[in-house]
Amino acid sequence: MQTKHDTVRLPNGVQMPKIGFGTWQSKEGDQAITAVSTALELGYRHIDTAAGYGNEKSVGIAVRNSGIPREEIFVTSKLPNSKRGYYSAFETFKQTMDNLELEYLDLYLIHWPASFHRFQDWEQINLDTWRAMTELYKQGKIKAIGVSNFLPHHLKALMETEVTPMVNQIELNPGCRQLETRAYCQQHGIVVEAWSPLGSGRILNDENLAKIAKKHNKSVAQVCLRWALQINTCPLPKSVTPERIKQNLELFDFSLDQEDLELIDKLPDFGQSGNHPDKVNW
């Protein structure tokens, strides 16, 4: 029987909790500290932050003050776009660790790829950044390394390196299913994480998802998160509301059946944020 403490094995053998707690838009200070502390109390063991979220210090405080052994909490952060490149990556990682005040990081991701619409040498920028992260990984400062928002053409060059990406965190929900990227990652042994697994609220009023939720006596949010788990991805729901934080973890007393999954597969694309990796200007 699946439980909230289930893990997925990354390519290097590291075990990552399948459900993570997202902290995007959780404000530095009391809000982020309280949200992460609540999540840990309720049973989350995977906390996802980023330098770009501006709340690494608060995440670190909540993790350190939780009373939970450090090795039982999986902490992720991300390299911001303004710090891509070999030397910048080293400097920024040090700042992240100073913010978190942790001895090591479980997972470090390149937050967004350098892309061709902004950089002529975009592939080299990504490779230089990845080389720095690989060195930090080999030094034991990071347990696993990966990327975020990388599409197959961004990943291709990295797949020819000494250490290949172990995780790709992408926008993923029933209204934004990312079939091509998911297939590529599965083919190459890359674990997929889902950011915005609830579509930032865009998909929660969909009639088809509401029908599935009613059938299982669950919320639409719980159906979305359960779907992410059943397609072998790792959702990262975020909230600062204790009851929603709790509900987002209550996913293991029901399963979507084939009819449910087929209905979701037929949904139109309506859950995207509009932030396409080849079009964003940051």
Image (tube, rainbow, N blue to C red):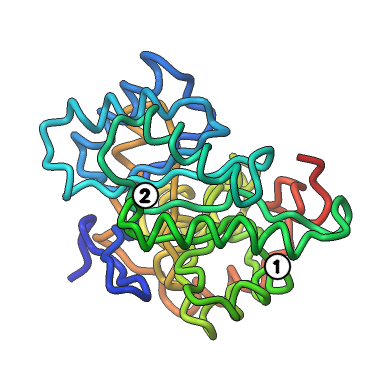
Task: Give the residue pinned by disc 1.
Answer: 154
Q: Which of 9 and 234 is in front in this view?
A: 9
- Vertical order, 207 against 165 (above or below): above
Decide: few, some or many residues near mark 1? Use Cα within 10 Å; few <14, some 14-19, many ≥20: many
Disc 2 on helix, strand or loop? loop
Residue 247, quarter of the rendered image? top left
- Dot 1 amino acid type: His
Q: Nearer the viewer, residue 153 or 227?
A: 153
Q: What residue is drawn where x is 17% and y is 49%?
A: 72
Percent position of residue 70, x then y: 17, 43
- Dot 2 amino acid type: Gly
Percent position of residue 60, x then y: 31, 29
Task: Give the residue pinned by disc 2.
Answer: 20
Q: In which quarter of the image is the N terminus?
A: bottom left
Percent position of residue 134, x then y: 47, 62
Decide: few, some or many residues near mark 2? Use Cα within 10 Å; few <14, some 14-19, many ≥20: many
Percent position of residue 189, x then y: 46, 80
